[in-house]
Structures are given as C-alpha cells and as structure tokens.
Amino acid sequence: MTRHLRVLLVDDHPLLRRGVAELLDASGRFAVVGSTSTGAEGLALAAVLVPDLVLLDLHLPGIGGLQVLADFKCQSPASRVVVLTASAAHQDLLAALQAGADGYLLKDIDPNALLAALGDCVSGRLVLDPALTEVLACGLRERGPPAAAPAELTERERQTLALIAEGLNNKLIARRLGISDGTVKIHVKHLLSKLNLHSRLELAAWAYRSGHISGWEEGA
C-alpha cells in the first residue's frame, strides 16, 4: 500500500485551509496531518508531526511567514516547504526563495496544477507558479546583472546549472552526473557566488534569462 505524503497547512484563512485539505485528502496521494492559523503553532506541530510537506502562507499573525519559513528549514530540513500565497510581488518571491522555499505558488492556481506541483516538489523538484516567471525576471533585473558571464563557469558548473534549471535537487543531480551529493553542493555554492544569486530558483531563472538555457520567454 502506497504511503500518503503527510502535509501540514499553515494559513490564517480557515476556509482556504479546509478547501485545500479536502483537495489533498481526496487526491489519494496526500494526507493532511495538521492545520493551523499561526506560524508558532505550525512550528510546534512540525516538530511533532514531521510532515513531508508544509504549505505556508507568507502573511500570518504573530511570527511572519518569512521567519517561519526560515525556522522550518532549520528545524525540519527534511520537510519540503511550499509558499502558497496571494502575493505576486517580486520582493516577496525573492525573499521566500532566499529564505529557502522549495516552491512558490499563488492561491488562484488551478487545483489540478496545485496537485501536480506539490507532487513535483516532494519528488525533489523546485516549483514556481507559471504566472511568476516574468515577476522573477523583473526582480532579478532590479538587482542588477550577475557577477559572472557563462564563459566563466566550468563545464561541470554548466552541467549542474542546466539540471538546476530542470528543477532537480542535489540528490537527483548527483545521480545524473555520477558524482556525490557533497560535490553537487560545492558546485551550487560556486554558482551562487559567481552569479551573485541567493537561491536555486534564482539560478534557474538566470539560466533561462541569460540564454544559457533555452526556454525563458521574457516579456511573453
């Protein structure tokens, strides 16, 4: 029997929590094991429940969503954390990615698209709402050009960057390249430093925006 993926919901809107819980529980793949309206209680529940996935709103009473996100990543590093929010502001998007979010989705996302994105996330991929690719590009433009050109990247860094752009996590990249997880972490660290970026999704966006990886449709 396939184990259901355990989900914790942290959002201050009861109606939304109930609707998302019903959707996930009916999917046959996910099981909502906890639900709360505050970040403090979410952190306490996560410590006990150890969920596979946390769905987190950014705007919460008490401890703000970004601080809760950072605390989640320190407290429960094995749990994937996806921000589910109404905010499409690039400042919120970039801040969430920098704090360690494994995904950023908008609350008006299609239910089937939400299920698909969450499935991708727990499989090790980074997920971004399709409506936010241009928002991310604008945010990166405002931060200025990266510190390095593609020519300054090593071949292995280029390969790692391409796989990050596909949304693969370190374990899957290591398997694809035939190297250790630790070596992948070193390549990712070098990429972030050379390109003056702060998260894997920013690396993926930069790869497309710079033309290093085909598929970025800026201004589309």
Image (cartoon, rainbow, N blue to C red):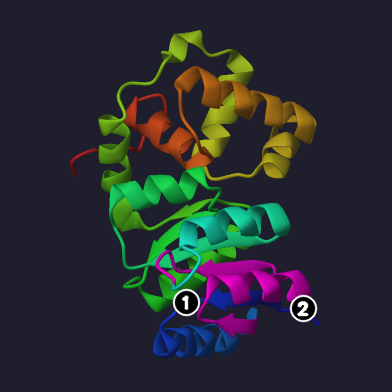
- Nearest to N terminus: mark 2 or mark 1: 2
In-front residue for pair 67/134: 67
Q: Quadrant of the N terminus?
A: bottom right
The amino acid pointed to by label 1 is Asp
Q: Residue at x 25, y 39 (%)?
A: 138
Rendered location of residue 59, percent (x, y): 40, 67
Q: Quadrant of the C terminus?
A: top left
Q: Which mark is residue 11?
A: 1
Q: Is residue 171 visible?
A: yes
Between 177 and 39, the residue placed more toward the observer is 39
Label 2: element kind: loop
Instruction: Point out residue 106 in the picture as x, y percentages from the top left corner.
Output: 36, 65
Q: Provide residue 42's location: percent of width, then percent of height.
A: 61, 73
State which region is magenta.
32-60
- Label at residue 2: 2
> Which quadrant holds residue 57?
bottom left
| Residue drawn at (59%, 87%) of the image | 25
* Residue 215 sits above or below residue 43 on the image: above
Residue contact between numbered discs 2 and 1, judged by CB atoms under 8 Å: no
